[in-house]
Amino acid sequence: MENKEELKEYEGFTVGLALVDALPVIFFSCSLICIASALAGSGITFWIVLIGAVAVALAGLCKVIWKLLLGLKVGNIKILNKIFVPFMAGGFMVAIIGALIGTFTKVIKWGGVLNAVLSIPSLIFFIVGFCGMGVMSYVRKTNDRDEFNKDAKKNWIAQFVNAFSQCMLFLAIFFATKG
């Protein structure tokens, strides 16, 4: 069976890896809740940013489900992996459009956002989180894409770094929106 042969390529992908992969999605979703609550009542800006952020979270969720199905030896449901990049890129693009609309309609007051981001402890968490994202990007860029995507060890490293980075960014956003 072709699908069983495909599973051999992902032999090291376990349920545990899928669960670790879920952590960044959870942290991003928590960040989304903080941002959405800060934008609540802002009309169209809120909805556009929310739609974009939900698309990004769905991209991550699809990747988690893909890895979970690999770990459970159900099969390689390729569409769950393939939609990750378009949903992620599209979601961020929609969220940016929402932020631009919020800027032009003066719903988002960037001076206040900047003050919140530069406040302590938010600034520290943002710096650490972005450094972690930089490390993850470096690891991805210095490895062959196909090899990286099928190498469980490299995926474990990337997901721990991603989970840590997303946790730091969540804490930064949490403190910035609650301050």
Image: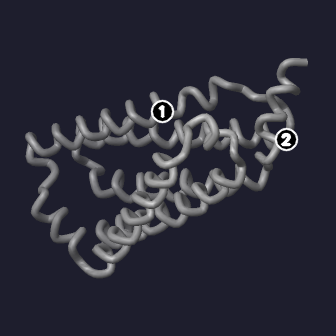
**Quadrant that contains the C terminus:** bottom left
Q: Please name the residue shown 28% across and 81% down the image.
A: 120
Horizontal and vertical percent position of residue 38:
29, 57
Q: Position of residue 57 (x, y in %)?
A: 50, 43
Task: Give the side of residue 52 with respect to residue 151, left or right.
Answer: left
Three-letter code for the amino acid on which mark 2 is drawn: Leu
User: Is 38 placed left or right of 61 in the picture?
Assistant: left
Q: Residue at x 8, y 40 (%)?
A: 104
Of 160 and 144, nearer the camera is 144
What is the image's colouring? one colour
Tag 2, which secondary structure? loop
Question: Circle 1 sits on which residue?
Answer: 85
Answer few, some or many: residues within 10 Å of disc 2's Cα (few below 14, many 20 plus, some between 14 and 19). Answer: few
Q: Is residue 177 above or below residue 22?
A: below
Work out which residue is located at the far top of the displayed protein and give it.
1
Q: Amino acid at mark 1?
A: Val
Where residue 160 sits in the image (x, y, percent)? Answer: 60, 62
Residue under the point 86% across and 36% down: 73
Q: Is residue 81 above or below residue 143?
A: above
Label 1 neighbour load within 10 Å: few <14, some 14-19, many 20+ = some
The answer to which image quadrant residue 105 occupies is: top left
Verify CB contact (< 8 Å) between mark 2 and mark 1: no
Residue 16, image x and y in percent? 77, 55
Kindly indicate the quadrant of the structure image that contains residue 172. Answer: bottom left
Q: CA distance from mark 2 to mark 1?
A: 23 Å
Above or below, comparing residue 59 to residue 26 in the picture: above
**Residue at point 81% right, 43% down?**
71
Quickly name the residue at label 2. 72
Image quadrant holding the N terminus, namely top right
Residue 86 located left or right of residue 82? left
Name of the residue lying farthest toward the bottom: 120
In the image, 40 versus 162, the foreground residue is 162
